[in-house]
Amino acid sequence: ITVDHGSKSLLITVPRKIFPMSKKTRLDKIERREAVIGLIGLGYVGLPLAVEFGKEGYQVIGIDIAEAKVRQINAGKSYIPDVPTQDIADLVSKGKLSATTYFSALQTVDPISICVPTPRSKTKDPDMSYVVAATDQVVKYCHKDLLIVLESTTYPGTTDELIMPRIEEKGFAIGKD
């Protein structure tokens, strides 16, 4: 799916295994900009992504554990130099962007992107505790037809090894539910 934004283009690549084309209603909802986008983590990856989705007409709900970030976004203010405060203010005033510390908001989203940090340990391995914690919250509020995207910088296989088993333990079939 390609979303054009002026001179920029945002390409969302969705593997058939996770988002089968037979689920046309989900694709239609995204293409008609009726999908409510959820983002976990409103840092240097999540906030710019939230703003771009909002500019494209999607309603975006950002979730972050940092109450100060949530307050600033809901007040229409940016805390990231590359994200203009005016963009945040415009989206908040139009009802296209909101933020919360409550993961229960995941019950209302269609696709969700996990954009949490993966800082490196002393041995240079990514600290996956943030991804695991975010995934555990997704599992808690997971619902049928939820598309889950991992945006965090991590090693190949993270989705297969960490995320999919937790979703399947809840009784969901990847690619079907």
Image (cartoon, helix red, strand yellow):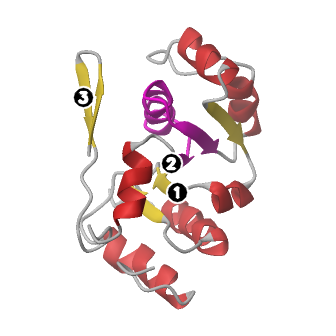
Q: Which residue is mark 2?
A: 35
Residue at image position (48%, 18%) is 83
Number of numbered callouts drawn: 3
Q: Earlier in the sequence, mark 1 or mark 2?
A: 2
What residue lies at 57% left-to-right and 62% top-to-bottom? 134
Amino acid residing under circle 2:
Ala
Q: Quadrant of residue 17?
A: bottom left
Q: Earlier in the sequence, mark 3 or mark 1?
A: 3
Residue 170 lies, with reference to residue 66, above or below; the image says below
Q: Residue furthest top?
A: 86
User: Do the CB atoms of the residues marked 1 and 2 lie less than 8 Å apart?
Assistant: yes
Relative to 158, residue 161 above or below: below
Q: Position of residue 168 (x, y in %)?
A: 47, 86
Was residue 106 drawn as part of the magenta stretch in this picture?
Answer: no
- From the image, state whether disc 3 or disc 2 is nearer to you: 2
Q: CA distance from mark 1 to mark 2?
A: 6 Å
Residue 141: image quadrant is bottom right
Where are the magenta residues, as a range? 35-63
Across and down, in percent, residue 69 comes to: 68, 32
Q: Which mark is residue 9?
A: 3
Q: Nearer the viewer, residue 112 or 166?
A: 112
Tell me the CA gap for discs 3 and 1.
Answer: 21 Å
Q: Residue at x 50, y 80 (%)?
A: 167
Left or right: 107 as drawn, with respect to 82: right
Question: Is 23 situated above or below 123?
Answer: below
The image quarter containing residue 126 is bottom left
